[in-house]
Amino acid sequence: MTNYQTSKLNALMDAIVATIQELNCQLNGESVPVVKRKLPKKEQQVDPAVQITVCAAEDVEDQQYHDFTGAMRVTYAFEITIISPNNDDQLTNLDLYTEWRESIRMRFKKPPFVVYYGTDESGVALPVTVFQMRVLPGKFLDRNLISENYDYQMLRLEIVVIEGTS
């Protein structure tokens, strides 16, 4: 059997996207797309007007020894961003966007959050051991991006995993 592995960072981003999709955030009766990107950025010609973007945060993973066996406690940080048109309108859908933000925050307050990053040579799934999750407020409205005529409302999600010595 062939073993398959992706990075834990990528597996965690995929799991975050899937978890937010399960919340089924809707606008005008349509599900809002949740996408994975390198940056919290909307592609003007490609993306819909409203979307939720998941990306790795700008800062690098924090690594600390967890115990005397050499296991590491690694903190991965992510940004979850609700991107929507502004059109110099500071009121439309404000209640809806804050509801989405709250729903996302509540969903990630604590594990269980099961993530697999591949399989070993015998086909057994390789789990990521999620030790802790923290949702931190991000900018509610990034004022530096208003000139782009879009609202960027952010949350920061930190996922702490335990990585063994193997």
Image (cartoon, grey):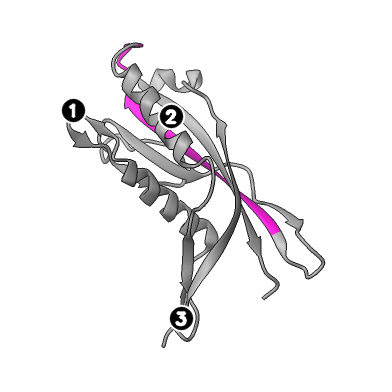
Of mark 2 and mark 1, the one earlier in the sequence is 1
Residue 131, percent across and down?
62, 54
Of residues 162 and 80, the one drawn nearer to the viewer in this rendering = 162
Q: To which residue does mark 3 refer?
A: 3
Residue range in magenta is: 73-90
> Is residue 5 visible from the viewing direction of this image?
no
Instruction: Using a 10 Å C-alpha cutoff, classify the residue at mark 1 as few (fewer than 14 neighbours), some (14 to 19) or many (20 or more).
Output: few
* Main SS of residues in magenta: strand
Instruction: Give the structural element (helix, strand or loop) at label 3.
Output: loop
Q: Which residue is mark 1?
A: 28
87 to the left or right of 61: left
Residue 28 vs 91, above or below: the answer is below
> Which is more foreground, mark 2 or mark 3?
2
Q: Residues within 10 Å of mark 2 (few under 14, many from 20)?
A: few
The front one of 55 and 102 is: 102
Residue furthest to the left: 29
Disc 2/disc 1 C-alpha distance (Å): 19 Å
Give the mark nearest the N terminus, 2 or 3: 3
Residues at marks 3 and 1, CA–CA distance in whole angstroms: 43 Å
Residue 166 at least partly seen = yes
- At a point 30% along the width and 34% down the height, the residue shown is 44
What is the number of the mark on residue 102?
2
Q: Quadrant of the N terminus?
A: bottom left
